[in-house]
Image: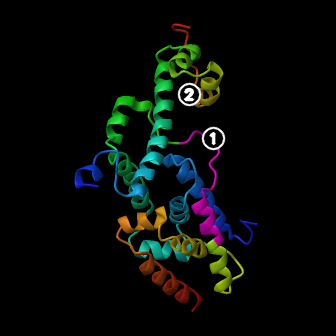
Amino acid sequence: MDEKTRTRVGGPEDPREGLEAVVALRRTLEALEAAQVENAFLAGWSWARIADVLGVSRQAVHKKHAARIKARHPGRPPGRGGA
Amino acid sequence: MMFTRFTDRTRRSVEAALDEARMLGHDSLGDEDLLLGILSADEGIAAGALSSLGVTLEGAREASEEMLSGALASIGISLEEVRREAGEAFDMRIPDNRRIPLSPAAKEALVEARKRMRRMGDNYLGTEHVLLGILDNEDGAAVRMLARMGVAADTLEGRLFEFRDRATG
């Protein structure tokens, strides 16, 4: 393997570094999903519409995010836009 | 049982470790979180030895976050940019309704802690035993985190026994 191949982005030469990147990405993905669902909710999107774009069921999105978002934004009515 | 003979302080440190893990977005409680928990409990021989070498809770949290952003940077992702794009709603914190299991590395550290306790002839499991259990995993996140802070496992272990000798007279 030449130097260029070994050091290219996404192909770290240390397997541990590669695996740790996966863990970091998974954790960041979870936080990013939570943030973007919250952003959509606050923009007035319905759970159904959010679920549609994420490609999962409305129930799945609601179960995963509703309690957290409602606790963070008490008094906000559920989104209606585009339902 | 994994938690028998724990002192109150050890128990508190594990609870604090869970809080730290949750705050930092760790979806399982790792050996580095056990270390953060010991620092958070902020008393006892283990915390004393750590602070004598300049290891603080704040510093350890920062090192943990740096390890995360460093891992992302290695695949070309900037945590700062992700944060900026997502806005105020972005928070690494694990939601309260999600349970955080002990990682295999953390379990192993607690098993090693118990062995250390027996070998040292103690009948209680203190934070010093947990710290020694953590240090036994040379490849673990906690040991690498300490190295980032300029502290070698051997040095810390030596310091721990000095503090212990002093405490028991």
The residue mark sitting in front, 2 or 1, is 1
Quick check: B12 above or below B52?
above
Is residue B12 highlighted in magenta? no
**Which contiguous range is marked in magenta?**
B94-111
- Residue at 65% of width from left, 45% of height from top? B99
Residue in the picture at 52% in, 7% down: A82
Disc sitting over residue B55 in the figure: none
CA–CA distance in space, label 2 to label 1: 14 Å
Q: Residues within 10 Å of mark 2 (few under 14, many from 20)?
A: many
Q: Place residue B67 in its image quadrant.
A: bottom left
The extreme bottom residue here reads B169
Q: Which residue does the numbered mark 2 point to in the structure image?
A: A69
Same chain assignment for discs 2 and 1: no
- Kind of residue at badge 2: Ile
Residue beneath the point at 65% across and 22% down:
A59
Quarter occupied by the N terminus of chain B = bottom right
- Residue position marked by numbered label 1 in the rendering: B98
- Residue B102, image x and y in percent? 63, 56
Q: Count the marks.
A: 2
